[in-house]
Amino acid sequence: MSTEPEPASEDTAETVEPGPGAPGAEDTATAETGGEGGDAAATAAQVSETEAELAAQRVERERIERRKAEKQGPIEAGGKLSGTAADLLAAVRAVEGGEK
């Protein structure tokens, strides 16, 4: 098993391209649209698909960060229990409360 990274495929190269506001984006856009009208439409579709993928990745990263933050917060004892587990915890608390 090699520890060398695999070479980037065409799919990965598309997702790494700079977005419309990134430095160098104008150079890429003008170089790609320099062809025929059909090429420009295909390039625009490819760019919008790439932008959609990047937006989806941003949303996913935000969701992951929110979940990590929730997990790092204080844990409320029995806060998310239901059914038998909640009943058992209530019984234990009742017994412990009676012993004091």
Image: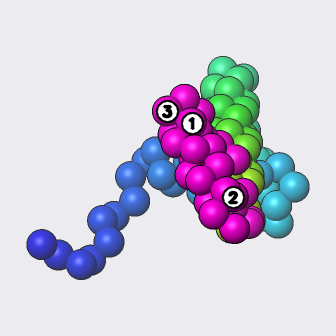
- SS of the residue under disc 3: helix
> Does 84 lie within the magenta span?
yes
Residue 21 falls left or right of residue 25: right
Which quadrant is the N terminus positioned in? Answer: bottom left
Q: Quick check: 77 above or below 34?
A: below
Question: 92 or 52, which is in the foreground?
Answer: 92
Q: Label 2: state its secondary structure.
A: helix
Q: Which residue is mark 2?
A: 97
Residue with the mark numbered 3: 84
Assess whether residue 79 is covered by the magenta stretch. Answer: yes
Q: Is residue 82 above or below residue 88?
A: above
* In-front residue for pair 59/68: 68
Label 2 crowding class (10 Å Cα cut-off): few <14, some 14-19, many 20+?
few
Where residue 56 appears, x then y in whole percent? 68, 39
Q: Amino acid at mark 3?
A: Thr
- Label drawn at residue 87: 1
Residue 52 pos. (x, y %): 70, 35
For the residues labelled 1 and 3, say whether their Cβ atoms are less than 8 Å apart: yes
Q: Which residues are magenta?
A: 73-100
Q: Amino acid at mark 1?
A: Asp
Q: How many marks?
A: 3
Nearest the eye: 62 or 4: 62
- In the displayed structure, would residue 45 be above or below residue 55? above
How far apart marks 1 and 2 lie (CA) works out to 15 Å
Towards the viewer: 22 or 57: 57
Q: Is residue 31 above or below residue 43?
A: below
**Distance Cα–Cα, label 1 vs label 3:** 5 Å
Of the numbered discs 2 and 3, the one sitting upstream in the chain is: 3
Give the left or right position of residue 41, taking residue 11 as reference: right
Residue at figure coordinates x 46%, y 45% from the top left: 11
Tell me residue 21's x, y (percent).
87, 55
Quadrant where the C terminus is found in the figure: bottom right
